[in-house]
């Protein structure tokens, strides 16, 4: 079964708006939660990651919010830009070798 | 910058052929991974290797094998290609910590 559930499957946001992508997991042994960004024709690239000992991590316009009790985490993209249009994947791992990925969200930012 | 290269961007093979996908990393990373990426399924781990000649099965190893004779090179082998192995194949590597660096992917079509 899907270890990490991601929603929505696709998202359209106006330039300057906030994009929010959500993920949920069941395995409480997971201790590393990354978000990857993938442009067409490219491999995924690490965008930002969080450990469960903090509830929020911010890097520029990108923020991860983490809710340990609800077993959910989300990616917020502030002031979304057309250049942010890509596919985003959440993931979770407890070993650094076995990663479980969400099914991906295709983000389109309209100018 | 870490560089992970994959031998082919696009590959077309016939059912029953033996297929080799090659991955090379230039950062002396210990750990290397092979994933397949399918729409609606995200990335799924096929095999990973934590040292030369060492390998571990991931979630979907059936129909695949791997070879790691040198630290920088990790090969994925489809012993007898089938149409359900048509997919995007992604290689990744990492050293310590959890961050993985992905190659650009090989889109394999099996006819």
Image (spheres, rainbow, N blue to C red):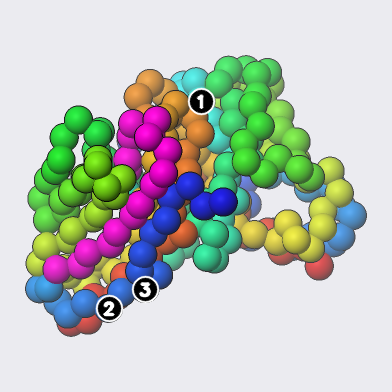
Q: Is residue B99 left or right of residue A78?
A: right
Q: Which residue is mark 2?
A: A12
Disc 2 on helix, strand or loop?
A: strand
Residue at image coords 62%, 41%: B59
Instruction: Kindly indicate whether the residues beneath marks 3 and 2 are on one polypeptide chain.
Output: yes
Is B63 rendered above or below residue A16?
above
Is residue A64 within the magenta segment? Answer: no
Is A100 rendered above or below residue B95?
below
Instruction: Kindly indicate whether the residues beneath marks 1 and 3 are on one polypeptide chain.
Output: no
Q: Which residue is mark 1?
A: B31
Percent across and percent down for residue A90 are 36, 51
| Tag 3 near tag 2, CB within 8 Å | yes
Which chain does tag 3 point to? A
Percent across and percent down for residue B32 are 54, 30
- Magenta region: which residues? A18-34
Disc 1 on helix, strand or loop?
A: strand
State the CA–CA distance, disc 1 to disc 3.
32 Å
Name the disc covering residue B81, or none. none
Residue at image coords 17%, 61%: A77
- The answer to which quarter of the image holds residue A18 is bottom left
State the CA–CA distance, disc 3 to disc 2.
7 Å
Is B15 rendered above or below residue B92?
below
Instruction: Kindly indicate whether the residues beneath marks 2 and 1 are on one polypeptide chain.
Output: no
Q: Is residue A63 left or right of residue A6?
A: left
Q: Is residue B77 left or right of residue A21?
A: right
Is residue A20 within the magenta segment? Answer: yes
Disc 3 on helix, strand or loop?
A: strand
Which chain does tag 2 point to? A
Name the image quarter holding the C terminus of chain A: bottom left
């Amino acid at each position: 079964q899907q270890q990490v559930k991601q929603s929505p499957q696709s998202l359209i946001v106006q330039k300057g708006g906030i994009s929010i992508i959500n993920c949920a997991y069941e395995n409480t042994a997971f201790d590393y939660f990354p978000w990857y960004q993938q442009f067409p024709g490219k491999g995924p690239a690490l965008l930002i990651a969080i450990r469960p000992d903090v509830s929020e991590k911010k890097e520029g316009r990108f923020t991860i919010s983490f809710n340990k009790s609800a077993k959910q985490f989300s990616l917020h993209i502030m002031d979304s830009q057309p250049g942010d249009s890509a596919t985003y994947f959440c993931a979770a791992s407890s070993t650094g070798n076995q990663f479980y990925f969400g099914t991906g969200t295709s983000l389109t930012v309209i100018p | 910058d870490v560089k992970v290269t994959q031998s082919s961007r696009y590959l077309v093979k016939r059912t029953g052929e033996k297929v080799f996908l090659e991955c090379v990393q230039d950062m002396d990373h210990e750990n290397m991974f092979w994933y397949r990426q399918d729409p609606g399924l995200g990335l799924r781990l096929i095999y990973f290797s934590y040292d030369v000649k060492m390998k571990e099965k991931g979630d979907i190893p059936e129909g695949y094998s791997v070879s790691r004779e040198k630290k920088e090179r990790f090969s994925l082998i489809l012993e007898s290609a089938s149409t359900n192995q048509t997919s995007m194949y992604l290689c990744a590597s990492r050293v310590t910590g959890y961050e993985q660096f992905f190659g650009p992917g090989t889109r394999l079509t099996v006819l």
